[in-house]
Image (cartoon, grey):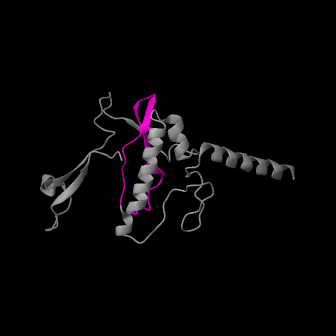
Amino acid sequence: MQVCEHELVPLTAIADRLPFGLRSDAENFLLIHRFDRDAGTATGRLHMEDFAQITGTPLGVVLLERSVKGEEDLFELLRRIKVNELLGNFDAHLKNFSMLYRTPQAAELSPAYDIVAYSAYLAGHGHALAFAPGEKDAGGAARAGQHLAHPRTQAADGAGRHRRARDAKLA
């Protein structure tokens, strides 16, 4: 799985910049390097678009239609979803998956970020993404627009919705 560059660093490296005192048992912190900053561009940044910004489009469709890596990125996305499930990250939502644009014409799945094993610290279960149209979350609420349906399934679901709306108007 492709992840951000990271390193374990002694807290003494940032102790003088913290707005609070360090605990006596605190030794290290996990430093995550921003993959969209310090780029070789005029602004020093790379454009990134999370899947919540790409509204109304299932994740799988976005990757197949926008990514220069196509199926390779789709399989990487599936690996990330599985890792989130295995680690108990029931908060892996659309804003935790992004497309990174190294050039305006070349989008690809960004490195993985915000993977947290919440179930080790909090009570919870399930996942924040729906995997089929109409799937409901643990509370019973529908999660429209956040599913991974295959483009044909998505098109069929949309066609059915339009037929029902048309029929309701004619009745």
> Which residue appears farthest toward the right when viewing the image?
171
Magenta span: 88-116
Give percent across and percent down for residue 110.
39, 42
Residue at 46% across, 28% down: 105
Residue 58, above or below 131: above
Quick check: 6 left or right of 74? left
Counting from the top left corner in percent of width and height, residue 78 is at 46, 49
Question: In the image, is 47 to the left or to the right of 29?
Answer: right
Residue 126 in view? yes
x and y percentages locating residue 42 in the rendered image: 32, 27
Residue 96 appears in the picture as rendered: no
- Residue 93, magenta (yes or no): yes
Q: Is residue 80 left or right of residue 137?
A: left
Magenta residue check for 142: no
Numbered marks: total? 0
170 or 2, nearer to the observer: 2
Using the image as rendered, state which of residue 21 and residue 109 is in the foreground: 109
Q: Position of residue 52 (x, y in %)?
A: 50, 48
Q: Nearer the viewer, residue 37 or 132?
A: 132
Q: Residue at x 64, y 43 (%)?
A: 152
Q: Please, is residue 98 above or below residue 103 in the view? A: below
Residue at the spot 48% in from the left edge and 43% down from the top edge: 74
**Relative horizontal placement of residue 87, taking residue 166 as reference (left or right):** left
